[in-house]
Amino acid sequence: METIFTKIVNRQIPAHIVYEDDLVIAFLDITQATKGHTLVVSKAPYKDIFEIPRDLFKHLFGVVHKLSGAINKSFNPLGINLLNNNGIEAGQTVFHYHVHIIPRYDLNEIDIKLKNNSSNLNVEDYKKRAEMIITALL
Ligand code: AMP
């Protein structure tokens, strides 16, 4: 299915493109949550991490690695967050696989904070959760 990112790939709408190859394109996120906020996008419109083929995923993350280095070099941030939302409940708004590279200059500039939900858990709970994942890998 065509998305807003397909339109960028096809040059139907403008974007500030910083990288492109046969499989992947990267451009500045329009919101610029922080200076240099960049999206790395698969050209083919796979919806999310469950749809994107593993080889393409590996290639895309190679590009994420390369661009993180370039952003680090050009803007000299104090840190970088990588963010990939999958599903509405996870905050995904564009259903076309992409990874955010978000350079960080200040701890409080944007809010990406994980809550600690461990207070009611015991060792058995952790064991059960780990076993469920291990079983699913088989
Ligand atoms: P997500 O919420 O993880 O699906 O991220 C989608 C991102 O796409 C948001 O951060 C938007 O700001 C960004 N976005 C949407 N439309 C455009 C556009 N035309 N050019 C650049 N970024 C866009």
Image: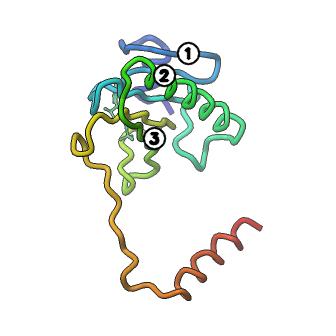
Image mark count: 3
Residue at the spot of label 1: 20
| Mark 2 and mark 3: Cα distance apart in space | 14 Å
The quadrant in which residue 59 appears is top right
Question: Image check: 99 left or right of 43?
Answer: left
The residue located at (43%, 35%) in the rendering is 100
Q: Are marks 3 and 1 in contact (CB under 8 Å)?
A: no
The x and y percentages for residue 44 are: 58, 28
Looking at the rendered structure, the secondary structure element under dot 1 is strand
Q: How is the structure coloured here?
A: rainbow
The residue located at (47%, 23%) in the rendering is 6
| Mark 2 and mark 1: Cα distance apart in space | 6 Å
Residue at the spot of label 3: 82
Give the crowd class for mark 1: few <14, some 14-19, many >=20 residues within 10 Å: some
Mark before the other along the chain sequence, 2 or 3: 2
Give the crowd class for mark 3: few <14, some 14-19, many >=20 residues within 10 Å: some
Looking at the rendered structure, the secondary structure element under dot 2 is strand
Residue 79 tag number: none
Within 8 Å: ligand 1 and the Cβ of disc 2?
no
Residue 26 tag number: 2
Looking at the rendered structure, the secondary structure element under dot 3 is strand
The residue located at (72%, 65%) in the rendering is 137
The x and y percentages for residue 18 are: 46, 15
Amino acid type at circle 3 is: Leu
**Which part of the image, by quadrant, shows the C terminus?**
bottom right
| Mark 3 and mark 1: Cα distance apart in space | 19 Å
Mark before the other along the chain sequence, 2 or 1: 1
In the rendered view, would you say 123 is above or below 34? below
Question: Image check: 129 left or right of 106?
Answer: right
Work out which residue is located at the far right of the displayed protein and give it: 138
